């Protein structure tokens, strides 16, 4: 039975969990009334193609990120070759590039009228032509280059944790390096690889910007078109619920595949196991360098070229307004999200009962909800509140009787909170776990309790974790496109929205300025991640 002091945390944990359950319940309630004409049109013209495109995209990205991430992780963690020391951390830098930015850079470079094909035609004749860039393969390549770091980072940590002992034992038993990899290292790293793959698949299902740039229809683009094309919020919510079903199936499949397995916990060793020489060393360096160049160096250089050619002329008062809107939204969302995540962390620490743990687990499911799903669900809920509560109450009080919640800043901030509370929860939980319970107990014995205990004891010790959580949420909000695009109040354009508008018109060079700004800001948490990874044993 819970202690009375623990019960005080119940309302907080349950309230935050209810924020995540709100979109789910709204999406389910949206099926009470189905617009048969819209669904008949969708089924006759789009639904088979949406299902096929989404399935092909998920399968293609899954194969790509596993192949790329695992091969790079194995080479940089257990093999020695020229450039391994800097490629080890450099291969994490593509985390900083949003998918929709790499998408329009890829098209701008490799399209028929792009600089590469134009240069080749000038040198080798007009018969030179690449395969069509705006294709299924093009979308898959872009998303693989953006999302492979999820698998790379987790697989690399798993291989490092295994240490050299297991591989050396396999070699003593007569296994070749290739056999030891397949029979020992890879099965033990499967939980970590599965977790990274699940993240990559969820990001693929949630992606809107990259597939919109390629004109590749998936569920996320269909939600946007149904909302703005058919002006049917309920039909968009029903499509969003189907997308959410796919996400939940991915999470369930990852949990079942992982089972009770956990990565090995042996500490990493400092020396590489395999010292590659000759053509093997050159092949390893070339493979890792090629991926790094395609995923980070070439896109960044192309953005700089476009910025100098055209983007720098857009540096005016309107662009300053975009930056201010972006920073304001990111800062406010980070402040709110970190504050709520702090409450959850303390609830789990001070009231570790089964109901509180379940509520905290539910609250952290928000990251699995795509931005487009959250946007539709929250706007549907707020539209209902406006119609049945706000407008009648405003009219009764003599007001204008206009909707206040639909299209408001509060709706957008709520979507950010639900989506990114899990991002803030992790660093805060780790920071609080490092504070021994004896320290606050000693403070209470000295008469320091309540708010004074938090501000004088907890907060100074939690400051690094708070700053990390705030930075991660801030950057994620800056890069979030679907929720911002669908829910922003009138006149509240951001850098992500500007990129979408410019790429929709094929203005790649003009999209370079906001894209370059987002990439540079996105490097901040990636550099922090690299520094933390470098402090692991063996680095």
Image: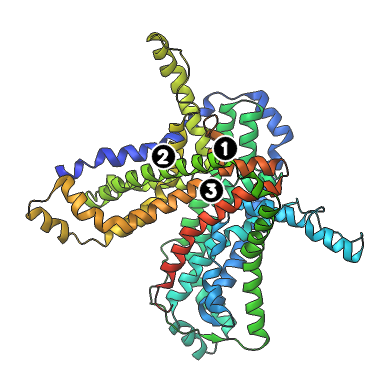
Q: Of helix, strand and loop, which one carries label 1?
A: helix
Q: Of helix, strand and loop, which one carries label 3?
A: helix
Q: Is residue 332 visible?
A: yes
The answer to whether the residues at label 1 and label 2 have Cβ atoms under 8 Å apart is no
Mark 2 Cα within 10 Å, few/some/many (few <14, many 20+)? many
Question: Which residue is tagged 3?
Answer: 479
| Up-down relation of residue 90 to residue 332 (above or below) | below
Q: How is the image coloured?
A: rainbow
Distance between the Cα atoms at labels 2 and 3? Answer: 21 Å
Closer to the camera: disc 2 or disc 3? 3
Q: Which mark is residue 264?
A: none
Q: Position of residue 254 (x, y in %)?
A: 50, 56
- 7 and 478: which is toward the camera: 478
Q: Position of residue 324 (x, y in %)?
A: 49, 41
The answer to whether the residues at label 2 and label 3 have Cβ atoms under 8 Å apart is no
Question: How many numbered markers are drawn?
Answer: 3
Drawn side of residue 531 relative to residue 143, left or right? left
Q: Which mark is residue 20?
A: 2
Residue occupying image coordinates x 43% and y 82%: 270
Q: Which mark is residue 485?
A: 1
Outermost residue toward the left in this view:
446
Q: Position of residue 86 (x, y in %)?
A: 54, 75
Distance between the Cα atoms at labels 1 and 2? Answer: 20 Å
User: Going from the N terminus, do you reach mark 2 or mark 3 first?
Assistant: 2
User: Going from the N terminus, do you reach mark 1 or mark 2 first?
Assistant: 2
Quarter assignment of residue 197: bottom right
User: Going from the N terminus, do you reach mark 1 or mark 3 first?
Assistant: 3
- 436 and 243: which is toward the camera: 436
Residue occupying image coordinates x 22% and y 54%: 458
Q: Of helix, strand and loop, which one carries label 2?
A: helix
Distance between the Cα atoms at labels 1 and 3? Answer: 11 Å
């Amino acid at each position: 039975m819970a202690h009375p002091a623990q019960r005080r945390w119940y309302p907080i944990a349950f309230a935050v969990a209810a924020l995540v359950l709100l979109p789910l319940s709204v999406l389910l309630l949206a099926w009470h009334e189905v617009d048969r004409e819209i669904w008949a049109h969708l089924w006759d013209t789009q639904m088979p193609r949406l299902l096929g495109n989404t399935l092909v995209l998920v399968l293609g990205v899954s194969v790509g990120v596993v192949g790329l991430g695992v091969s790079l992780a194995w080479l940089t963690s257990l093999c020695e070759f020229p450039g391994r020391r800097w490629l080890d951390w450099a291969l994490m830098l593509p985390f900083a590039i949003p998918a929709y930015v790499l998408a329009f850079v890829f098209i701008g470079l490799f399209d028929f009228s792009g600089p590469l094909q134009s240069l080749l035609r000038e040198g080798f004749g007009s018969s030179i032509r690449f395969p069509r860039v705006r294709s299924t393969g093009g979308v898959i390549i872009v998303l693989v280059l953006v999302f492979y770091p999820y698998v790379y980072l987790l697989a690399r940590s798993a291989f490092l944790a295994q240490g050299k002992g297991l591989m050396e034992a396999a070699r003593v038993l007569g296994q070749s390096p290739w056999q030891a990899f397949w029979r020992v290292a890879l099965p033990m790293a499967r939980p970590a690889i599965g977790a990274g793959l699940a993240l990559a698949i969820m990001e693929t299902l949630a992606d809107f910007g990259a597939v919109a740039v390629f004109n590749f229809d998936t569920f996320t683009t269909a939600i946007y078109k149904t909302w703005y094309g058919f002006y049917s919020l309920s039909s968009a919510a029903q499509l969003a619920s189907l997308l959410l079903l796919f996400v939940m199936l991915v999470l369930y499949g990852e949990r079942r595949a992982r089972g009770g397995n956990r990565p090995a916990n042996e500490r990493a060793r400092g020396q590489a196991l395999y010292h590659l020489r000759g053509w093997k060393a050159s092949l390893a360096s070339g493979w890792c360098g090629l991926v790094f160049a395609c995923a980070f160096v070439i896109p960044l250089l192309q953005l700089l070229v476009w910025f100098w050619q055209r983007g720098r002329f857009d540096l005016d008062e309107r662009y300053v307004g975009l930056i201010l809107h972006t920073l304001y939204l990111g800062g406010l969302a980070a402040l709110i999200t970190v504050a709520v995540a702090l409450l959850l962390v303390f609830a789990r620490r001070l009231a570790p009962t089964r109901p509180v743990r379940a509520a905290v687990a539910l609250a952290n499911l928000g990251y699995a909800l795509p931005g487009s799903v959250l946007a539709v669900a929250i706007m549907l809920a707020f539209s209902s509140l406006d119609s049945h509560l706000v407008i009648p109450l405003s009219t009764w009080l003599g007001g204008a009787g206009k909707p206040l919640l639909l299209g408001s800043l509060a709706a957008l901030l709520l979507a950010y909170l639900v989506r990114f509370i899990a991002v803030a929860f992790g660093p805060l939980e780790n920071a609080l776990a490092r504070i021994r319970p004896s320290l606050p107990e000693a403070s209470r014995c000295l008469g320091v309790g309540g708010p004074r205990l938090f501000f004088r004891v907890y907060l100074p010790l939690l400051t690094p974790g708070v700053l990390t959580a705030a930075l991660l949420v801030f950057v994620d909000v800056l890069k979030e496109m679907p929720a911002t695009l669908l829910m922003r109040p009138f006149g509240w354009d951001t850098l992500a929205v500007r990129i979408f508008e410019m790429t929709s018109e094929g203005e790649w060079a003009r999209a370079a300025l906001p894209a370059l700004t987002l990439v540079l800001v996105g490097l901040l948490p990636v550099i922090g991640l690299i520094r933390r990874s470098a402090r692991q044993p063996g680095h």
